[in-house]
Image (tube, grey):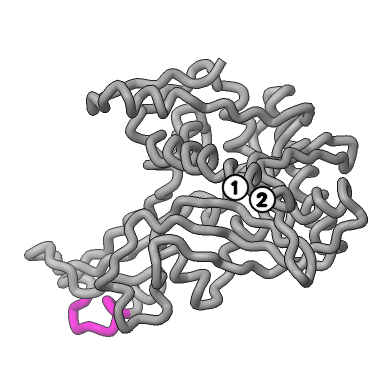
């Protein structure tokens, strides 16, 4: 049974029908790629509380729209017999059966290209175009490459890439800015790892997943999510005027804030230092498991 879906914003019936059509399964596996590359705590909490989780339809719209696009694009494989679409593959490492759905695998003169369709924002695509590592995309696609190696050892893999639908694309912003996506759909090539690097990563993530599952089964504390996994903003130490409450400077380091106060004449009397913890953006706005997460709830006290 999946989570309960509400409709707080009265989305129309055809949209709700689209949102309800999610036939994804992870096949005969213990865990899929997107689950074991995610923070282990999130994956296990979502599994444990899947019957209790409540989400609103408005938060599922883009995922549903993405599923619709996938369905339409499956027709490409019917018209092009060399193109393999929606291929589900699985294998085993550390005694764990794992697998994933590959959106498109298509031959080229150099070998097969593995593609994954994603809906995303222009900022994320811009980072990838500028050469900044986008680890979740890169990790996911390299896991898919390893699935192809295991299941089709005779096939040479020439590359991996994301085909990104840029949902906030702007023609005006694209003009004169070569690092901004130049079209509403952009192909983003990703670094393909050597096989030994992919195997090491997969085994590391599966080991973490196994550890977390055992902790959950025995009631032990979960593996905490890292600040990076939580999309946590930096902590702030704000130097404010005691009399007016107005801010003089903001620092991401307490010592620097103290140094500023000490450097000012009568600084201890003129200024106060206030601390604001960085907001864990993913936990606060995007994680379905947050209501059941001891790590997150402990910070709200």
Which mark is on residue 80?
Answer: 2
**Residue 272 part of the magenta-drawn span:** no
In this view, 204 is above or below 23: below
- Asked whether the viewer can see residue 232, the reply is no
Q: Position of residue 243 (x, y in %)?
A: 8, 65
Disc 2 crowd rating (10 Å Cα; few below 14, some 14-19, many 20+) is few
Q: Position of residue 119 (x, y in %)?
A: 46, 51
Which image quadrant is residue 244 in? bottom left
The residue tagged 1 is 76
Residue at screen point 55% across, 21% down? 50
**Is 295 left, or right, of 199 in this rendering?**
left
Disc 1 crowd rating (10 Å Cα; few below 14, some 14-19, many 20+) is some
In this view, 189 is above or below 262: above
- Asked whether the viewer can see residue 121, the reply is yes
**Is 113 left, or right, of 290 in this rendering?**
right
Q: CA distance from mark 2 to mark 1?
A: 6 Å
Where are the magenta residues, as a range? Answer: 260-267
In this view, 294 is above or below 231: above
Which mark is on residue 227?
Answer: none
Seen from the viewer's position, the closer of residues 44 and 79 is 79
Residue at screen point 40% across, 21% down? 5
Q: Position of residue 30 (x, y in %)?
A: 77, 30
Give the quadrant of the N terminus.
top right
């Amino acid at each position: 049974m999946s989570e309960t879906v509400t409709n707080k914003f009265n989305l129309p019936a055809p949209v709700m029908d689209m949102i309800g059509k999610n036939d994804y399964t992870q096949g005969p596996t213990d865990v899929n790629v997107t689950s074991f590359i995610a923070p282990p705590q999130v994956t296990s909490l979502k599994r444990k509380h899947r019957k209790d989780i409540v989400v609103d339809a408005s938060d599922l719209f883009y995922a549903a729209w993405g599923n619709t696009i996938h369905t339409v694009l499956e027709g490409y494989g019917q018209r092009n017999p060399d193109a393999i679409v929606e291929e589900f593959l699985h294998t085993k490492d550390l005694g764990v059966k794992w697998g994933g759905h590959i959106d498109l695998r298509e031959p080229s003169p150099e070998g097969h290209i593995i593609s994954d369709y994603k809906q995303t924002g222009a900022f994320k695509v811009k980072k990838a175009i500028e050469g900044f590592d986008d680890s979740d995309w890169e990790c996911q696609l390299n896991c898919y490459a390893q699935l192809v190696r295991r299941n089709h050892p005779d096939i040479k893999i020439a590359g991996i890439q994301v085909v990104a639908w840029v949902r906030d694309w702007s023609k005006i912003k694209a003009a004169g800015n070569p690092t901004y996506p130049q079209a509403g759909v952009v192909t983003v090539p990703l670094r393909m790892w050597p096989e030994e690097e992919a195997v090491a990563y997969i085994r590391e993530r599966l080991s973490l997943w196994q550890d977390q599952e055992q902790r959950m089964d025995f009631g032990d504390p979960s593996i905490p999510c890292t600040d990076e996994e939580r999309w946590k903003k930096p902590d702030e130490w704000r130097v404010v005027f005691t009399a007016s409450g107005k801010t003089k400077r903001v620092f991401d380091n307490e010592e620097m804030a103290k140094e500023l106060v000490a450097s000012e004449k009568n600084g201890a009397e003129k200024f106060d230092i206030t601390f604001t913890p960085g907001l864990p953006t993913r936990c606060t706005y995007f994680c379905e498991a947050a209501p059941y997460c001891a790590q997150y709830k402990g910070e709200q006290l």
